[in-house]
Image (cartoon, rainbow, N blue to C red):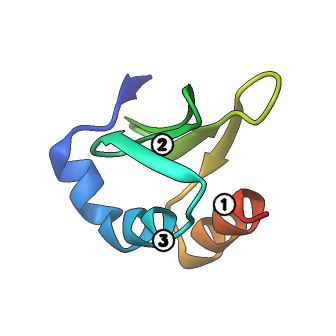
Amino acid sequence: MKHAKSNALDQLEPLLAAIRDIAAFKEKTRGVFYLKSRAALHFHEDPKGLFADYRTTGDWQRFPVNTKAERAALLKALRP
């Protein structure tokens, strides 16, 4: 699964803006977010749609982000 390119990230811009509003996350490059000095969130695209990979302490967790409900679920997981 490849990392999301600019056109895919364009589709996610409202979600990216909401993540930017969460103070703990710092966006190093568009669509790649860090918690402190560790990569914590990035996006992928494949024929099945768009996905976010999120890591808090252990393994990466994959979240689909194709619908409003899926994006809301990701934001809920990201908020402290």
**On the image, numbered disc 3 is attached to which residue?**
21
Residue 59 appears in which quarter of the rendering?
Answer: top right
Tell me the kind of residue under disc 2: Lys
Give the mark nearer the N terminus: 1 vs 2.
Answer: 2
Relative height, residue 55 to residue 80 (above, below): above
Pointer 1: residues within 10 angstroms few (<14), some, or many (20+)? many
Q: CA distance from mark 1 to mark 3?
A: 14 Å
User: Which amino acid type is shown beneath numbered disc 3?
Assistant: Asp
Which element carries disc 1, helix, strand or loop? helix
Q: Which is more N-terminal, label 3 or label 2? A: 3
Q: Mark 1 touching mark 2, by CB under 8 A?
A: no
Q: Secondary structure at mark 3?
A: loop
The first of marks 1 and 3 along the sequence is 3
Q: In which quadrant is the C terminus drawn? A: bottom right
Residue 79 image point, x, y percent:
72, 65
Q: Residues within 10 Å of mark 3 (few under 14, many from 20)?
A: few
In the image, what residue occupies the spot 76% across and 36% down?
56
54 with respect to 48 (left or right): right
Q: CA distance from mark 1 to mark 2?
A: 17 Å
Q: Nearer the viewer, residue 24 or 62?
A: 24
- For label 1, the residue is 74
Circle 2 or circle 3, nearest the eye: 3
Q: Residue furthest left?
A: 7
